[in-house]
Image: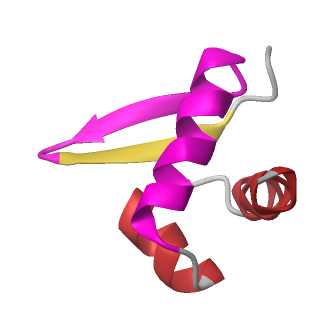
Amino acid sequence: MEENRDKVIKCLKENPEGFTISELAKKLKLSRQTISNCFSFLEGAKKVKIRQVGMAKIYLWDGGK
């Protein structure tokens, strides 16, 4: 799980526009559930921001600022 989380963090840091769960799942070839679990952890740790665009949530790296 930690390995997947590190992959998610790396992608978020490289793309300041952020990702939806579906976009990141496709890019990393991981399940949507795995990505969702990683985002839940990162959201709880206040490492990501969420921007709502219509029905989609875009997750952006915040780094805990």
At x 70% / y 55%, what residue is drawn? 12
**Residue 36: percent from left, percent from top:** 47, 48
Q: Is residue 56 visible?
A: yes
State left or right for residue 13 relative to residue 59.
right
Question: Up-down: is 53 above or below 15?
Answer: above
Q: Is residue 20 visible?
A: no
Q: Nearer the viewer, residue 24 or 2?
A: 2
At x 41% / y 47%, what residue is drawn? 58
Quarter placement of the N terminus = bottom right
Quarter placement of the C terminus = top right
Q: Nearer the viewer, residue 50 or 28?
A: 28
> In the rendered structure, does residue 27 fall within the stretch colored magenta?
no
**Residue 38: percent from left, percent from top:** 62, 45
**Residue 23: percent from left, percent from top:** 44, 72
Quadrant of residue 14 in the image?
bottom right
Q: Nearer the viewer, residue 29 or 58?
A: 29
Quadrant of residue 17 in the image?
bottom right
The outermost residue toward the left is: 54
State left or right for residue 28 relative to residue 63.
left
Question: Up-down: is 16 above or below 41?
Answer: below
**Residue 25: percent from left, percent from top:** 50, 73
Residue interval drawn in magenta: 31-55
Question: Up-down: is 6 above or below 29?
Answer: above
> In the rendered structure, does residue 49 fall within the stretch colored magenta?
yes
The outermost residue toward the front is: 1
State left or right for residue 63 relative to residue 51.
right
